[in-house]
Amino acid sequence: MISVTEKAKDRITELRSKEGYDNNYHIRVAVEGGGCSGLMYNLDFDSASRPNDQVFEDKGIKIMVDKKSLLYLIGTVLDFSDGLNGKGFQFVNPNATRTCGCGESFAV
């Protein structure tokens, strides 16, 4: 399962509205090869579920994840920070054994 914090929920709701998406658009989270640690997170809006997707819902936010990415993301919490140490979505991933300095990529 993937969960979201209240701050992330609020920011997702705000962005969905700002981008002109209706409530049929949900969050898609994926893991792709790349970055300085080997794997990168990809976060986007999507309205269509795919055959290999797992769909989770937390705090009214639906999250779609393909089965391959789910192996790397089980137990992850999606957070949002707007503090002095950086602004943006952050993945708190218990499966990551190492992350890069910018937090954009990770390794397992």
Image: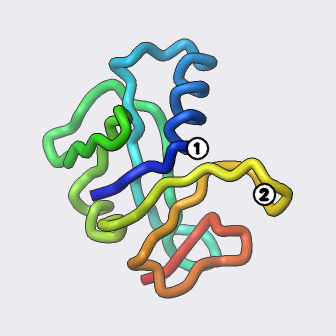
The quarter of the image holding the C terminus is bottom left
Residues 88 and 84: in front is 84
| Residue toward you, 34 or 92 | 92
Q: Position of residue 93 (x, y in %)?
A: 45, 70
Q: Can you tell which quarter of the image residue 61 is in?
A: top left
Q: Residue furthest bottom?
A: 97
Looking at the image, is 47 positioned above or below residue 65? above
Residue 101 sits above or below residue 6 on the image: below
Disc 1 residue type (three-letter)? Lys
Local secondary structure at mark 1: helix
Q: Residue at x 28, y 41 (%)?
A: 57
Q: Which residue is mark 1?
A: 7
- Disc 2 residue type (three-letter): Gly
Q: Residues within 10 Å of mark 2 (few under 14, many from 20)?
A: few
Q: Residues within 10 Å of mark 1 (few under 14, many from 20)?
A: some
- Looking at this view, name the residue that lies furthest to the left: 51
Identified at 34% across, 70% down, the residue is 72
Which element carries disc 2, helix, strand or loop? strand
Q: Is residue 11 left or right of residue 86?
A: left
- At a point 55% along the width and 13% down the height, the residue shown is 20
The nearer-to-camera label among 2 and 1 is 1
Residue that numbered label 2 is attached to: 86
* Image quarter of residue 31: bottom left
User: Residue 16 in the image: x percent, y percent?
Assistant: 53, 23
